Image: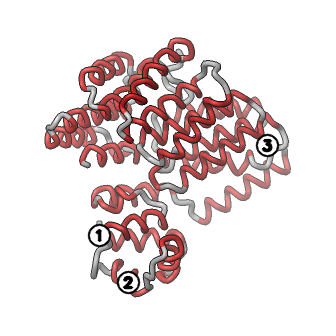
C-alpha cells in the first residue's frame, strides 16, 4: 500500500481535513506545514521521510514501523478496519449503557466471571474481536462505578482493552493503561493496583514501546508492595525488557534473576489465561529478553522449556518463540537467516491469528 493512501485513510478515520492534520503537526512540532503539502503526500507526489514520518506517527496514532513498511501498512489497515465501530454498533453500545443504568447491570460476581472468560479468550482470539467485545463491556460497567469492587473489575477490563492497541503508537494504549491504573486506585484493591501496572509494564516492554511509561508503571507497582504476586512478576519483566532495549545489560540480567526467584513463589498453575504466568509463559518473556541481550545459549534453553509446556491450542505463542529465534539469528550476525526464519514462522500462522505485536517483533528483527 502507498503511504499516501494510508495517510488519507487515517486522516479520514480521525475526521480531519488536510488543513487540520497540518495544524496538528505544526502545533506539536513547531513546523509550518501547509495543507497543500499534505495533499502532495496523499497524491504520492512526494513521500514523507525522517522527521515528518515521526510527526505523522504521533499525530495519527500509528506505529512508526507501520508508516515505514509497506507490508505492515496493508496489514495495519486491515486490523483498523476490523476494529472500527460503525454507527449501528455505536447505537447498540449507547443502548447497552443506558439499559445497564436503568436495570443496575451485572453483579460483581458476574463481572468476575466475565473477566475470567476474557482472560482465556485473549490468548486465542484476535485483537479486533476482543476490542469490540470489551468496548461494549466498558460502556456497561462505567454505569455501575458506585462500588469499589466494580472499579477493580473496570480497571482490569481497561487493561485488556489497552492491549488491543499497539503500544508503540504512543497514544491509545498508554492512555488506557494510565486510566486503568487510576481506576485500580479508586478500587482500593492492592492486588488490582499492582496487577494493572505490572501487566501494562510487561506489555509495553515486550513490544519495545513507550519504555519510559513501562518503567514508571513498573516502579509504581514495585513501590506499592514487595508481596509476591503475578502483578509484581510482570512489572519486573517489564523493567527488564526496557533495560535490555536501552542496552543496560547488567540491570536486565539482575531483574531476570529477581523475576525467576519471584516466580518460584508467585507462578500460576493456570495455563491459558492472560491473568496467568505459568512456567511456559515466563520463558516466553525470558526468551525474548535473552535474545535481545545476545544471550543465545540461555535464550535457546528458555525457548526449549517454553515449548515443552506450551499448550497446542495457543499457536500464536509458538510463533512468538520462533520470532525470538529469528532475532537470535539476526543478533548473532545472520540477519538474512533471522529474517527468513521469522518470516516463515509468520507465514505458517493463519492470518487471523496474527497480531500487531508479532508484526512489531518482525520489524525489530529486520532493523
- State the residue at coordinates (38%, 21%): 310
Left or right: residue 99 compared with residue 297: right
- State the residue at coordinates (43%, 81%): 33
Left or right: residue 119 compared with residue 136: left
Q: Is residue 201 or residue 144 the one in the foreground? A: 201
**Measured Cα–Cα span from mark 3 to mark 2:** 50 Å
Left or right: residue 90 compared with residue 279: right
The structure's colour scheme is secondary structure
Quarter of the rendering containing residue 241: top left
Q: Give the number of the mark in front: 3 or 2.
A: 2
Count residues near mark 1 (Cα–Cα under 10 Å), then give few for <14, some for 14-19, many for 20+. some
- State the residue at coordinates (51%, 46%): 212
Q: Label 3 near label 1: C-beta < 8 Å?
A: no
Q: Give the number of the mark in front: 1 or 3.
A: 1
Marker disc for residue 2: 1
Residue occupied by mark 2: 37
Number of marks = 3
Query: Is 234 above or below relative to 169?
Result: above
Q: Is residue 331 or residue 74 the one in the foreground? A: 331
Residue occupied by mark 3: 105
User: Residue 71, how many percent across, how many down?
Assistant: 28, 57
Amino acid at each position: 500500500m502507498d503511504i499516501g493512501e494510508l495517510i488519507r485513510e487515517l486522516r479520514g478515520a480521525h475526521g480531519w481535513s488536510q488543513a487540520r492534520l497540518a495544524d496538528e503537526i505544526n502545533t506539536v512540532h513547531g513546523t509550518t506545514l501547509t495543507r497543500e503539502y499534505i495533499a502532495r503526500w496523499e497524491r504520492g507526489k512526494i513521500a514523507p521521510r525522517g522527521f515528518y514520518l515521526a510527526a505523522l506517527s504521533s499525530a495519527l496514532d500509528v506505529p512508526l514501523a507501520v508508516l515505514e513498511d509497506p507490508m505492515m501498512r496493508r496489514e495495519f489497515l486491515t486490523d483498523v478496519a476490523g476494529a472500527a465501530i460503525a454507527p449501528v454498533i455505536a447505537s447498540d453500545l449507547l443502548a447497552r449503557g443506558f439499559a445497564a443504568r436503568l436495570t443496575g447491570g451485572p453483579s460483581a460476581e458476574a463481572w468476575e466471571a466475565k473477566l475470567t472468560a476474557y482472560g482465556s479468550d485473549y490468548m486465542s482470539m484476535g485483537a479486533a474481536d476482543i476490542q469490540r467485545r470489551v468496548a461494549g463491556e466498558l460502556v456497561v460497567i462505567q454505569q455501575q462505578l458506585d462500588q469499589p469492587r466494580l472499579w477493580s473489575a473496570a480497571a482490569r477490563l481497561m487493561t485488556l482493552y489497552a492491549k488491543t492497541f499497539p503500544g508503540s503508537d504512543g497514544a491509545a494504549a498508554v492512555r488506557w493503561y494510565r486510566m486503568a491504573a487510576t481506576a485500580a486506585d479508586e478500587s482500593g484493591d492492592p492486588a488490582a493496583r499492582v496487577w494493572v501496572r505490572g501487566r501494562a509494564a510487561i506489555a509495553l516492554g515486550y513490544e519495545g514501546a513507550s519504555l519510559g511509561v513501562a518503567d514508571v508503571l513498573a516502579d509504581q507497582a514495585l513501590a506499592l508492595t514487595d508481596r509476591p504476586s503475578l502483578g509484581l512478576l510482570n512489572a519486573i519483566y517489564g523493567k527488564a525488557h526496557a533495560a535490555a532495549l536501552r542496552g543496560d545489560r547488567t540491570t536486565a540480567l539482575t531483574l531476570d534473576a529477581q523475576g525467576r526467584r519471584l516466580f518460584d513463589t508467585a507462578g500460576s498453575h493456570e495455563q491459558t489465561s492472560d491473568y496467568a504466568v505459568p512456567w511456559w509463559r515466563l520463558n516466553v518473556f525470558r526468551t525474548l529478553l535473552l535474545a535481545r541481550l545476545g544471550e543465545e545459549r540461555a535464550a535457546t534453553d528458555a525457548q526449549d522449556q517454553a515449548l515443552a509446556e506450551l499448550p497446542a491450542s495457543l499457536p500464536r505463542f509458538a510463533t512468538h518463540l520462533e520470532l525470538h529465534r529469528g532475532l537470535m539469528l539476526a543478533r548473532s550476525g545472520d540477519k538474512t537467516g533471522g529474517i527468513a526464519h521469522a518470516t516463515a514462522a509468520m507465514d505458517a500462522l493463519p492470518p487471523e491469528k496474527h497480531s500487531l505485536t508479532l508484526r512489531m517483533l518482525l520489524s525489530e528483527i529486520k532493523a
